Amino acid sequence: MKSSWLDTNTFHYSDFADLEELVALKERKGLSISLCLPTLNEEQTIGKEVLIMRSELMTRYPLLDEILVIDSDSTDRTREIAAAFGAKVHLASEILPRMESFRGKGENLWKALYIAQGDIIVYIDADIKNIHHRFAFGLLGPLLRTDTIKYAKAFYDRPIAAGKNKLRPTGGGRVTELVIRPMFSLFFPELTMILQPLSGEYAGYREILEKIPFPIGYGVETSMILDIRERWGMDVIAQVDLEKRVHRNQDTKALGKMSFVILKTFLNRVERMGVLDIRSPLHDEMIQYQLEGDRGFRPDPFLVRGLERPPMIQVPEYRSKFKVQDAQEAMV
């Protein structure tokens, strides 16, 4: 019986716990690795994340070559703390100043490609309360140990906060189960094997990441999976079980906004692929309602422009910095 992608491309972080082996593989392949932490007001967690990654994966085992913080103009001490613990800190708004600047996670991830020096980029969210260096080495394992896997995505149990110092063991990943998994099931059933497509932790080779567009906001994880699958197929993708991730959870209204952005990204992608013919333009505004007084309701609109950054390899400054001769030839 032929093995499925779920059997062959799903790993556990402990499969890659031999860090000396990973360092040897990295050196044998002549690779450099950058860790990127996109931030916005993460002073409570950023210091510990940088400290652990730097001490375990730079000082103790030289797996990472640099730790970057790409910040969206935080108003707290995020940048100060990150720099104090040894990260290279950059304001997203100051990267590629010729271009108009936007705020959003996807914007930070995209701009990290220009700043980072690595052949492999590891992206990890900056709000993880139970941070451990497995969040990086677990994702790097499939990329270093094989020659075919070019992009690795995390999955994990996501406990949800249930009051002060209390966690419920289930309840996280609500947008995945209510929005993305149904959409994947309808249009791309093979993508349902990706257990947490919206996880914020993933690693990929520059040669892939530089060739795909990046939505500036929440839709970036969805678009990455769709674009990588369309261009290179499922075999270049892996997923790694990191066991548990504890972070702050958002309320239902915030998740509604996130769902709106992700759905819009998804529908734009499937139309572009020729999978779906959408006869009228998608609207940019989601309307939620706020209770006002005892019986009144007030509209609370949320505007999404749906902006995307082009593949980084098309940006002249990037081609010059990384000595890309012909962007069209490199896109093939």
Image: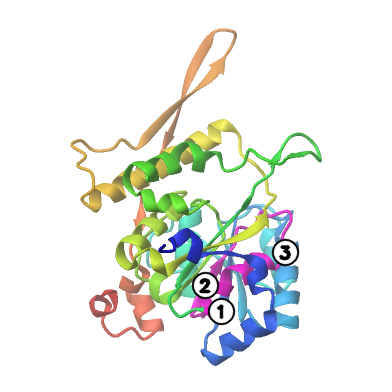
Q: Say if 231 sits above or below 161 in the image.
A: below
Q: Residues within 10 Å of mark 1 (few under 14, many from 20)?
A: many
Question: Relative to 32, is 307 on the left or the right?
Answer: left
> Measured along the vertical axis of the image, is residue 303 above or below residue 237?
above
Residue 89 percent across, percent down from the top left:
62, 69
Q: Is residue 173 visible?
A: yes
Instruction: Locate residue 193 relative to residue 99 in the image: left or right.
Output: right
Which numbered marker is on residue 121? 2
Label 1: element kind: strand
In the displayed orientation, state which residue is furthest to the right. Answer: 165
Q: Which residue is mark 1?
A: 33
The reply to whether dot 1 and dot 3 touch (C-beta < 8 Å) is no
Amino acid bearing label 2: Ile
Q: Is residue 98 left or right of residue 67?
A: left
- Which mark is drawn over residue 77? none
How busy is the neighbourhood of tag 2: few (under 14 within 10 Å), some, or many (20 plus)?
A: many
Residue appearing at x 49%, y 78% in the figure: 146
Q: Locate the N terminus by quadrant.
A: bottom left
Q: Are marks 1 and 2 in contact (CB under 8 Å)?
A: yes
Spatial separation of the CA atoms under disc 3 and disc 2: 18 Å
| Residue 331 in picture, x, y percent from top left | 28, 74
Judging depth in this view, the residue of 203 and 4 nearest the camera is: 4
Residue 225 position by quadrant = bottom left
Query: Distance of mark 1 from mark 3, alpha carbons?
Result: 18 Å
The residue closer to the viewer here, 20 or 10, is: 10
Q: Compare marks 3 and 2 and give the one earlier in the sequence.
A: 2
The picture places residue 112, in percent across and down from the top left corner, at 50, 69
The boundaries of the magenta stretch are 116-145
- SS for tag 3? loop
Q: Tell me the tag on residue 132.
A: 3
Secondary structure under tag 2 reads strand
Residue drawn at x 64%, y 81% is 63
